[in-house]
Image (cartoon, rainbow, N blue to C red):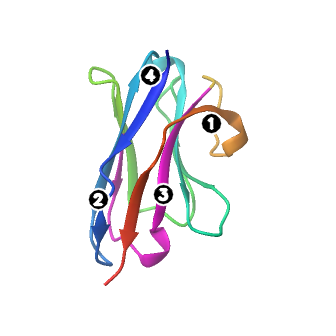
Amino acid sequence: QLQLVESGGASVQPGGSLKLSCAASGLILDYYAIGWFRQAPGKEREGVSSISGKDGSTHYADSVKGRFTISKDNLKDTVYLQMNSLKPEDAGIYYCAAGDLAVRSTYPYEYHYWGQGTQVTVSS
């Protein structure tokens, strides 16, 4: 059974850092695209970053480029999202999701398996 479990969410001050983890089971990371998404209260879910299972290429939303880094450890079946220089607008519930191997985007509709999310709060 395919399962994704996020962890690492916390409350931090603006300018702080967090590293989120997405632990996968029931799938081989190299066979799937993995994306990170976030949803703030009253807003639609938006794509933050993705990493291709095919070649490891990465994609970032413009709002996080240069601040966030996605990576994966196949031995640990885990995908990470390192978030630096956090801003209040980065707050929300962060989800990881798995999509087909050919997916290279962060459009939520292209991802079929979702975790339950982890809360990130950024405030002073």
Left or right: residue 106 versus residue 122 is right
Which of the two discs, 4 and 3, labels the residue nearer the N terminus?
Answer: 4
Give above or below for 78 relative to 35.
above
Question: Who is closer to the viewer here, 27 or 58?
Answer: 27
Give above or below for 73 relative to 10.
above
Give above or below for 92 relative to 51.
below
Tag 3, which secondary structure?
strand
For the residues carrying marks 1 and 2, which lies nearer the camera in this image? 2
Q: Which mark is residue 47?
A: none
**Which residue in the structure is indicated by mark 3?**
93
Q: Report the amino acid beneath label 4.
A: Leu
Which of the two discs, 2 and 3, labels the residue nearer the N terminus?
Answer: 2
Q: Which mark is residue 18?
A: 2
Q: Which residue occupies 63% across, 24% down? A: 100
The Cα–Cα distance between marks 4 and 3, rounded to whole angstroms, is 23 Å
The Cα–Cα distance between marks 4 and 2, rounded to whole angstroms, is 22 Å
Q: Which mark is residue 29?
A: 4
What span is in magenta? Answer: 80-99
Q: Report the amino acid beneath label 2.
A: Leu
Q: Which mark is residue 104?
A: 1
Q: Which residue occupies 27% across, 24% down? A: 76
Residue 28 point in image, percent of width and height = 44, 16
Which of the two discs, 4 and 1, labels the residue nearer the N terminus?
Answer: 4
Residue 47 point in image, percent of width and height = 59, 52
